[in-house]
Amino acid sequence: MNISKINALKVGEINKVQGFVENIRDKKSMAFLVVKDITGKLQLTIEKEKFPQLGEKVKELTIHSVITVEGPVVENSYVRLGGIEMLPESLVIESVAAPLPIEEKSSIDLRLDHRWIDLRSERNTLIFKVQTLIAAKFREFLVERRFVEIHTPKLIGAASESGADVFELTYFDRKAYLAQSPQFYKQMAMAAGFERIFECGPVFRAEKSNTNKHATEFTGFDLEFSGIESFEDVMKMEEEMIAYVMPFVKEQYGEQIKALFGEEVVVPTLPFPRVKLADLYQDLQTMYGLDPALCEKGDLCTEGERLCRRYAMDKFGHEFLFVTDFSAEKRAFYHMRNEEGVPQGYDLIWKGCEITTGAQREHRLDVLRAQAEEKGLDQDVKFYLEFFRYGCPPHGGFGIGLDRLTMILLNIPIKEVMFLFRGPDRLTP
């Protein structure tokens, strides 16, 4: 039985629980243990005179040993853990833990070396409960809107998107690559007439970036849909999806997030504010003195992105900000451009960090081929261009990193929100 199920309704009944030993106080006539599982903690009070064999077993225990205990649960107002305790009548030692190689104050890299131990904390298990809820509600939102979930291959025969930052590997007698994103296959689904699709799966980026927000493998939540009139339809879909999810996160985990991470979960209002890149830079220089030399022409520089946190709150009273009108040089070749050559896409910034690049895609084969040639990718993406030879509706979409979303929500580094982090210097455990 999970510890969370032991409540006032179970008081006086015989219960059986299994978990890790978190604390041991071995006295002369009594022993007090705290056992925990993923749902909570329970105090065990062992009466040695009544059950001497249990007292002997307590001597064998170490912190994080796993035990199974059975006995009545009674009320005790002096017990901090819910005012109840178990009086075990049997105790089975499932495994004895060696001295722990890490503690809470250990460095993140040392904790990652022993990640299976690090993940046992209430704080860390909450991360994945929150992440599970976010992914589930994303799915719920999309399924209710007729989206179909697909699973695209991660082994691909040509370097995707930019032709750079991909992992190359040997695939029998030829080269293959790990997919940077499911982008090409999402668009293939549009050409197949699926109309609305999404995917949640691994994404690989061969970037030697040692920052608190980059990883070489992460979980992407991507979607694509047809019948759009502009990239505004894509932005609207994303803002509504995020606004749908956040009330559930706040209701179910808001108090725990506040207690363990010190962060308030804010439910965003609709619509999210929008600003053109040129106007944003002008405002950042006027309002905060951003050095124009730091501004990367046609793209959002790191400092500008960081300042978007203050800017969005100061100007719009909002945590989220859509930035549009990037230069064609800085956007992928498959982004549709308007008559002035401006890509019809956006970045979504949350608390000063980019979480999404989205766009209306170019679905006209001649234009798409020309834009691929412009970036020197026409030969690399020949298989992709085939998708558009036999008709394809107007469409658009976006991808959002589930790990980065969780990172920003909880205000912790990317290494801590991933079950097992992968970066340039980490390939184990």
Image: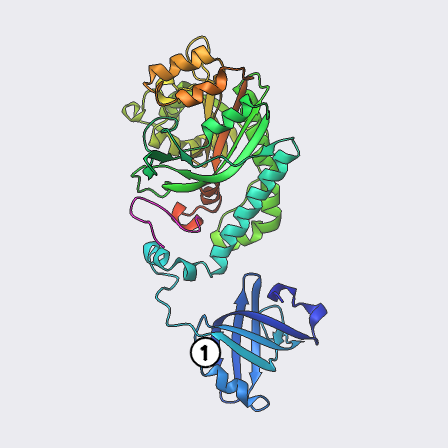
Give the extent of the magenta segment: 418-429
- Compared to 262, does 353 lie above or below? above
Q: Amino acid at mark 1?
A: Leu
How would you classify the magenta stretch by its main secondary structure? loop
- Compared to 18, does 251 lie above or below? above
Residue 111 belongs to the span the image colors magenta:
no
Point out the residue furthest to the bottom here.
49
Q: Position of residue 237 (x, y in %)?
A: 58, 28
- Compared to 134, does 296 lie above or below? above
Q: Position of residue 226 (x, y in %)?
A: 58, 22
Q: Position of residue 367 (x, y in %)?
A: 43, 11
**Which residue carries the number 1 mark?**
61
Residue 423 belongs to the span the image colors magenta:
yes
What residue is drawn where x is 47% and y is 61%?
A: 120
Point out the residue furthest to the right here.
9
Q: Which quadrant would residue 233 be assigned to in this image?
A: top right
